[in-house]
Amino acid sequence: MIRFLCSAKTKNSFPVTQQEIVFVGRSNVGKSSLLNALYQQKLAYTGKTPGKTRLINFFDIHGKYTAVDVPGYGYARRSDKELIEFGQMMDDYFSRKDKIKLVVMIVDSRIGFTADDLDMLEYLKDSELPYVIVANKIDKLSNNQLAKNKKEFFQEQDNIIYVSCLKKTNIDLLEKAICSYLEVD
Ligand SMILES: Nc1nc2c(ncn2[C@@H]2O[C@H](COP(=O)(O)OP(=O)(O)O)[C@@H](O)[C@H]2O)c(=O)[nH]1
Ligand SMILES: [Mg+2]
């Protein structure tokens, strides 16, 4: 059973959990779609309005781990105050390092890493958090174009999974990757 636990934005309102798998990505990159594909149900809103979800959402996944849906970053229409609050929320959340087993960072296979993505990547590397990159929307690319993008955009990275949430391509590979990072008792 998949169960919504809570929405939170400050340290003392985060739930008590055992192990967390965290999902991050730019607004509109397909994070909600990925969660839907992975869990075969709607955990968060899929929608055309970017930046809709502004809190960190926690879901219990079959009592095995907690899936954490972090708000999309790189949303241009945010005020300075909102950006500072967002940064604070991220720092508060990611400081709970012992809980975080894996960060799943979603990018767009058609455009590679944007400046915002590179900031996030640096943040993950600096924090020494384990992460995997999911390059989404490969259904929008021809085989040739995908091969080209793999080489041009993602050559430096070996921990990349190329997926289509729309067509459910390679979602099983991500599932396996997640499992491999979980502690089993
Ligand atoms: N073609 C295609 N479109 C996708 C895919 N994943 C998501 N989308 C579309 O991208 C848009 C944003 O998706 P959403 O899941 O709401 O992104 P979020 O803002 O990151 O949660 C929606 O119109 C989705 O239908 C995919 O794998 N292929
Ligand atoms: Mg969403």
Image: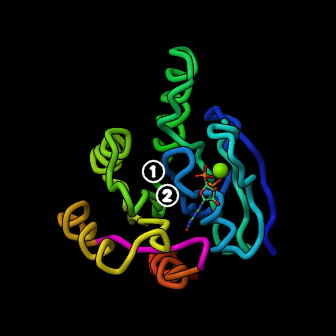
> Where are the magenta residues, as a range?
159-167
Q: Quadrant of residue 129?
A: bottom left
Residue 162 painted magenta = yes
What amino acid is labelled 2 in the image? Ile
SS category of the residue bearing label 2: strand
Q: Is residue 124 above or below residue 87?
A: below
How far across and down, in percent of the image, does residue 109 sit? 39, 63
State if disc 1 and disc 2 touch (CB < 8 Å): yes
Q: Quadrant of residue 42?
A: bottom right
SS category of the residue bearing label 1: helix
Q: Residue at x 81, y 64 (%)?
A: 3
Distance (Cα) linking label 2 and label 1 = 5 Å
Residue 71 painted magenta = no
User: Quadrant holding ligand 1?
Assistant: bottom right
In front of the other: 113 or 141:
141
What amino acid is labelled 1 in the image? Lys
Which labelled disc corresponds to residue 100? 2
The residue wearing badge 1 is 97
